[in-house]
């Protein structure tokens, strides 16, 4: 046999593939997607085979075959990344410009392969033998929606042009989950598998339980907080086809499930489907790509679809199926907006709470019903202010104030994790007149029982819910009426179904409007509509109180029905079209990072000059910046941004590649480049 070499992708932030030599026996074992152990620097690391073995004569460059390092170990064939998942990873690498090794590692981390505990084999997944629960009879509207989706699922490849992607646009409480379940039953009966994506880990336990009970078979869980042992066992069961249904968060889009027939992206509009760290991608868009690769039906479900998805429907790239009524003809909740500037407010508490709101909560609790209170800020107070000199306690590592956490006696940074004891005096003038400003969920949890002795409060935020077990316990206690008030951040908004909740309170809607993002109005409407939809899902009617200093804001007008949602969305679409924002253009954000502010600024300016020259010969490209990032300093690093906009995906990719080449020439600074995942063209 002639000498063989192979290219592998190492899970490091490096663009290159690396070449190794391998023995005849190893060459017979490997295939694209196999994991191997290789010497890399002074360590041995796992890597992924990125191409078929080839003859040493194809080796390019000055290095010789003898100088190449050898593959140390080849993983068993059954542990290789399936071809479909590998193709999805390659697409992700090409589109989002993330190193292939890091993408593959995100799809199949060492914990999933069992490399960290190699001596222990994967345990057999316990198979559920219970009978399927008799499904609820679908309403006439649900049945019509199901038939439309099922017809698309079972259509031939030629009939399904455009691809099998459908938006299930249903108001909150319209029973979208029942349609997901019926589609899943049909797919399983045909021997196909089912993948269900939820926007938050917080939602996966209730979806998992619902699908396992309804389908009568074992349902896998897949998310970043999964224990290594459970991930390894489920990976083995998926690769063998033993496990046919998976419920998971965004990373589940890469799970090695076989023979897919149905992919559901629940709450498709949710911004948490966008992965912001390392491998940057949008799970909703990757689900569409995976659907194309597998031939599966992709259902995007939402009561408040994203403008990007609505545009795909307008272009006839996606089908649209609607559910315009709640099940059993239950009324949508009554929405009341309180203008805080005109209201009498409760005195002596940290939060801004109107007397009318407090009275509504009291009446609801006295009637034996439940309340949800939404405040999108955790902690006791937003910051600590010296009343004498107006000094605000800031993070030493980030350009942000420290949040007051009274229970732990700490000031904390929610960006880098820095914490310190709450001081007794101002660090600048030594005054002891320190005032906590702005309310958080912790202060409301402490103060509401003083005003409402009958309130039994549970808090749902990332400070209180530190594990999947605690999350499940909190939700179960509220569902079982051990608590009558559930207080929390955006974890409250997403898909929870509590029939006993008749009142939802939004403490301060204004923070949603003021976020510096072109999607802020759209997302504010989505959040407020979703949180309002938690009320009145049982037999009793629901009520929603939204407190705001901006009662005339367009989002509030839509919420009250004073302006049609279609007119609001059309206005947003027109604005984006004029300004060349998604879905009418693609964005790429280039970020320069350095521990020195001036160096970050200087490098960003040079990068801008370089790209301006590069862009002169490219059509439809706009370069904005450089400017400080929204959070200029994070974890001790200064960050400057450039924004690239283009209606030509090809031009945008050419500029991104030029930026990456520029970045490789830097030593002290580094340029992080990622495509803003704003939809697939």
Image (cartoon, helix red, strand yellow):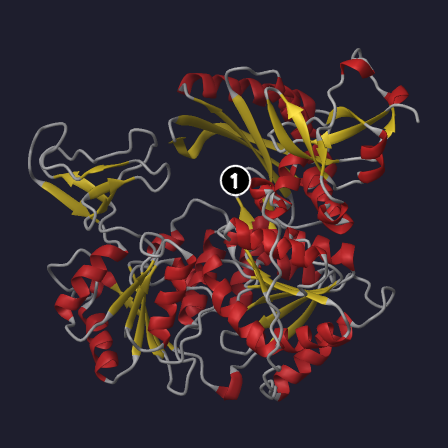
Residue at 40% x, 70% y is: 532
From the image, tell me which residue sits under label 1.
277
Where, by quadrant of the figure, is residue 397 drawn? top left
* Residue 180 in view (yes/no): yes
Q: Judge left or right: residue 594 versus residue 376.
A: right
Q: Quadrant of the N terminus?
A: top right
* Residue 581 in view (yes/no): no
Q: Nearer the viewer, residue 106 or 370?
A: 106
In the displayed structure, would residue 105 be above or below residue 493? above
Residue at 21% x, 42% y is: 410
In the rendered image, residue 229, in percent from the top left (x then y), is placed at: 54, 51
Q: Judge left or right: residue 81 versus residue 176.
A: right
Residue at 60% x, 70% y is: 169
Where, by quadrant of the figure, is residue 296 drawn? bottom right
Residue at 47% x, 62% y is: 526
Crowd band around label 1 with a 10 angstrom C-alpha radius: few (<14), some (14–19), many (20+): few
Q: Nearer the viewer, residue 503 or 133?
A: 133
In the rendered image, residue 255, in percent from the top left (x then y), is placed at: 65, 53
In the rendered image, residue 3, in percent from the top left (x then y), is placed at: 88, 23
In the displayed structure, would residue 122 be above or below residue 474? above
Q: Nearer the viewer, residue 605 or 360?
A: 360
């Amino acid at each position: 046999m002639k000498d063989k070499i192979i290219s592998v992708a190492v899970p490091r932030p490096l663009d290159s593939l690396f070449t190794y030599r391998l023995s005849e026996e190893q060459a017979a074992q490997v295939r694209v997607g196999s994991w191997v152990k290789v010497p890399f620097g002074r360590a041995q690391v796992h890597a992924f085979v990125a191409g078929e073995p080839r003859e040493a004569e194809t080796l390019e460059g000055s290095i010789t075959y003898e100088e190449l390092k050898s593959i140390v170990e080849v993983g068993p064939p059954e542990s290789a990344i399936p071809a479909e998942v590998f193709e999805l990873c390659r697409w992700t690498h090409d589109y989002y410009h993330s190193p292939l090794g890091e993408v593959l590692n995100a799809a199949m981390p060492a914990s999933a392969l069992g490399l960290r505990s190699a001596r222990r084999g994967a345990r057999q997944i316990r198979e559920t033998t219970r009978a399927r629960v008799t499904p609820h009879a679908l309403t006439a509207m649900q049945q019509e929606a199901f038939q439309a989706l099922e017809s698309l699922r079972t259509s031939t490849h030629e009939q399904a042009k455009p691809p099998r992607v459908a938006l299930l646009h249903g108001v909150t409480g319209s029973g979208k989950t029942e349609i997901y379940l019926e589609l899943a039953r049909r797919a399983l009966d045909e021997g196909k598998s089912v993948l269900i994506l939820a926007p938050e880990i917080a939602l996966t336990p209730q979806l998992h339980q619902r699908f396992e009970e309804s389908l009568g078979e074992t349902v896998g869980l897949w998310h970043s907080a999964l224990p290594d042992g459970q991930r390894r066992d489920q990976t083995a069961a998926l690769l063998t086809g033993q496990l046919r249904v998976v419920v998971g968060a965004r990373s589940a889009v890469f799970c090695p499930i076989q023979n897919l027939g149905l992919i559901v992206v629940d709450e498709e509009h949710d911004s948490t489907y966008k992965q912001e760290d390392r491998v940057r991608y949008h799970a909703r868009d990757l689900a569409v790509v995976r659907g194309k690769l597998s031939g599966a039906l992709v259902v995007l479900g939402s009561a408040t679809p994203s403008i990007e998805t609505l545009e795909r429907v307008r272009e006839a790239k996606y089908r649209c199926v609607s559910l315009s009524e709640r099940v059993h003809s239950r009324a949508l909740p009554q929405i009341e907006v309180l203008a805080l500037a005109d209201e009498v407010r409760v005195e002596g508490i940290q939060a801004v709470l109107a007397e009318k709101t407090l009275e509504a909560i009291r009446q609801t609790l006295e009637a034996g019903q439940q309340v949800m209170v939404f405040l999108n800020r955790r902690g006791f107070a937003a910051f600590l202010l010296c009343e004498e000199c107006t000094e605000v306690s800031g993070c030493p590592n980030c350009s942000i104030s420290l949040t007051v956490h009274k229970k732990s006696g700490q000031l904390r940074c929610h960006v880098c994790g820095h914490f310190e004891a709450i001081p007794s005096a101002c660090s600048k003038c030594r005054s002891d007149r320190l005032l906590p400003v702005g309310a958080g969920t912790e202060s409301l949890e402490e103060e509401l029982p003083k005003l409402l002795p009958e309130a039994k409060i549970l808090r749902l935020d990332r400070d209180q819910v530190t594990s999947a077990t605690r999350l499940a316990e909190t939700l179960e206690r509220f569902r079982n009426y051990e608590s009558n008030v559930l207080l929390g951040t955006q974890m409250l908004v997403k898909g929870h179904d509590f029939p006993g909740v008749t009142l939802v309170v939004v403490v301060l809607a204004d923070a949603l409007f003021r976020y510096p993002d072109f999607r802020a109005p759209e997302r504010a409407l989505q959040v407020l509509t979703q949180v309002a939809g938690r009320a009145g899902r049982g037999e009793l009617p629901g009520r929603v109180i939204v407190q705001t200093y901006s009662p005339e804001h367009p989002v509030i007008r839509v919420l009250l029905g004073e302006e049609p949602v279609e007119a609001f969305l059309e206005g947003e679409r027109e604005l984006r079209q004029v300004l060349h924002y998604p879905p009418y253009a693609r964005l790429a954000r280039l970020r320069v990072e350095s521990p020195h502010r001036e160096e970050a600024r200087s490098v960003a300016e040079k990068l801008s000059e370089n790209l301006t020259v590069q862009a002169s010969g490219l059509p439809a490209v706009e370069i904005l910046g450089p400017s400080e990032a929204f959070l200029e300093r994070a974890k001790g690093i200064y960050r400057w941004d450039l924004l690239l906009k283009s209606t030509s995906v090809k031009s945008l990719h050419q500029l991104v590649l030029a930026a990456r080449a520029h970045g490789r020439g830097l030593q002290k600074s580094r340029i992080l480049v990622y495509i803003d995942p704003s939809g697939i063209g």
